Image (cartoon, helix red, strand yellow):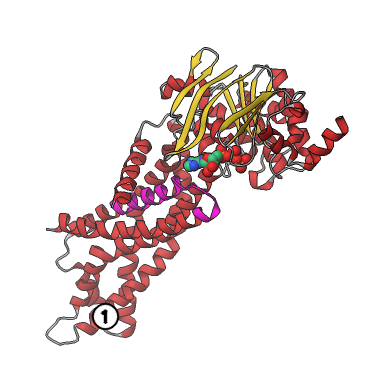
Amino acid sequence: MIRVVNINKSFSGVNVLENISVTFKKGKTNLIIGQSGSGKTVLLKSIIGLHDIDDGEIWYEDTLFNGLDFEGKKALRQNMGVLFQGSALFDSLTVEQNVMFPMDMFTNKSMEEKREQVNLCLKRVNIVNANELFPSELSGGMRKRVAIARAIVLNPSYLLCDEPNSGLDPKNSILIDGLIKELTEEYEMTTVVNTHDMNSVMEIGENVVFIHNGKKYWEGSNKDILKSDCDTLNDFIFANSLAKQLIVRRN
Amino acid sequence: MEKFLSSLGRYVLLLKKIFSKPEKIGIYYKQTLWEVVSLGIGSIGIIAIVSFIMGAVITLQTAYNTENPIYPTYLIGLGTRDSIILEFSSTITALILAGKMGSNIASEIGTMRITEQIDALEMMGVNSASYLILPKIVATLMFNPILTILSMVVGIAGGAIAGVTTGVISLQDYIYGIQYAFIPYYVTYSLIKSLFFAFIITTVSSYQGYYVEGGALEVGRSSTRAVVFSSLVLLLFNVILTQLLLS
Ligand SMILES: Nc1ncnc2c1ncn2[C@@H]1O[C@H](COP(=O)(O)OP(=O)(O)OP(=O)(O)O)[C@@H](O)[C@H]1O
Ligand SMILES: [Mg+2]
């Protein structure tokens, strides 16, 4: 479980997050939705400590994350897998070296053990025979998969994904979403996913938080989202014609 | 002014981060070797060519400026030697490296910044500044003096070949000249400068890349700035060091 309490974040005087409180549940795919520029990435990066928040609290179970020193944060981060918006694979390393990297940094396992774990994770995300390729030789979807493999290689308790299906075609988006949901349930992770894709919301949105201009406007599940009476949320949902048709069909 | 001071502050903070304890020495060692190969060895050719031409030109110019028969011709060798060792080898090598490496370093690190690879490193408990920048500093500190010596040798050889083939000086006189009243400290002085220059080029360029915000456009700008600023700063330090070391 990750609990965010009343956090604020500003950049040189401009408020980007205002008084956000939200709880992300264990074993569930928790979604942060909102339009481009609403503050999703800033919120995610604040949760993992890449941005220092101005005030508020971030709890991982019973640990106050933003109260920890560098070593404490580092220790907790071993337990987090992060998928960045653009995959963030290391250009100069092969697929295998990329996935192995967190183990190189955090563990003292032997080369065989590491390689075994790498292959296990790559297989889990359906990447085969690509160990020696470089990121530039992969398609966008494959890069996302490799980045997911890297994120789960240390068996983390927390998985944080920033727009896992940006830049992917609808079919691949659904595959990646499905994969994240499966992994979440399989490993009992607390998963947080940023997205502005309504398909994802309908597919995997068990617990959805809607933010707009850095403020939380709505929270609930994909079952309730179409029935909400929050105007800002409805504006966001109905901006998407596909979603509009979905709703018409459902009603 | 305010902007300058805050940039300077961030630069100092970055240096502090670079030199705060590296965790796994093993990966740094491998990284450093890689940087020596990719940054250093790739610069040998261009530095040799420029130094050769520079030595040739200095010899010919010194010859034309000392045509008066009261000057013994071996002075041409001596003049070439001192100009090359004291000033040109270290400065030209550094300026070439600033042009070649500065943009390289800034765009490599800047790209890693905007594609969130630096964030990913931090998430894996890696001190990204020291992981990315320290190997470059160590590598340039190692090979810049070597390149500077190479530049001296090739420059003096270039002078000899130009001088002898144009007939302005005989080989014997040239060799006599480059040995005449030789002060070994001049070489030391030049090598000390080359160490400072190496440090300036890598850290100033890394700084430009490390703090890039935005997209590909900003990465491009940062790599231009890396070349401009590292050249300016190293020329400024050239003056300061000359005053400190030679007076
Ligand atoms: N490092 C920063 N410095 C200053 N402002 C920033 C910084 N990072 C983000 N912002 C601002 O914060 C706001 C929210 O940005 P954020 O990246 O979180 O949006 P987002 O919801 O992730 O959008 P997208 O869907 O396009 O990724 C934007 O207005 C942005 O300009
Ligand atoms: Mg974002």
The residue pinned by badge 1 equals B61
The quarter of the rendered structure image containing the C terminus of chain A is top right
- Which of the four quarters of the rendered structure image does ligand 1 lie in? top right
Residue at the spot 45% in from the left edge and 53% down from the top edge = B39
Horizontal side, residue B205 vs residue B219: left or right: left
Residue B208 in percent (x, y) is at 42, 50
Residue B62 vertical position relative to residue A92 in the rendered view, above or below: below
Residue at the spot 37% in from the left edge and 31% down from the top edge = B21
* Magenta span contains residue B216: yes
Horizontal side, residue A148 vs residue B187: left or right: right
Horizontal side, residue A111 vs residue B41: left or right: right
Q: Residue furthest top?
A: A62
User: Bounds of the magenta span?
Assistant: B196-218
Q: Amino acid at mark 1?
A: Gln
Label 1: element kind: helix
Q: Main secondary structure of the magenta part?
A: helix
What chain letter is assigned to the residue under label 1?
B
Horizontal side, residue A203 vs residue B45: left or right: right
* Foreground of the two, B246 or A85: A85
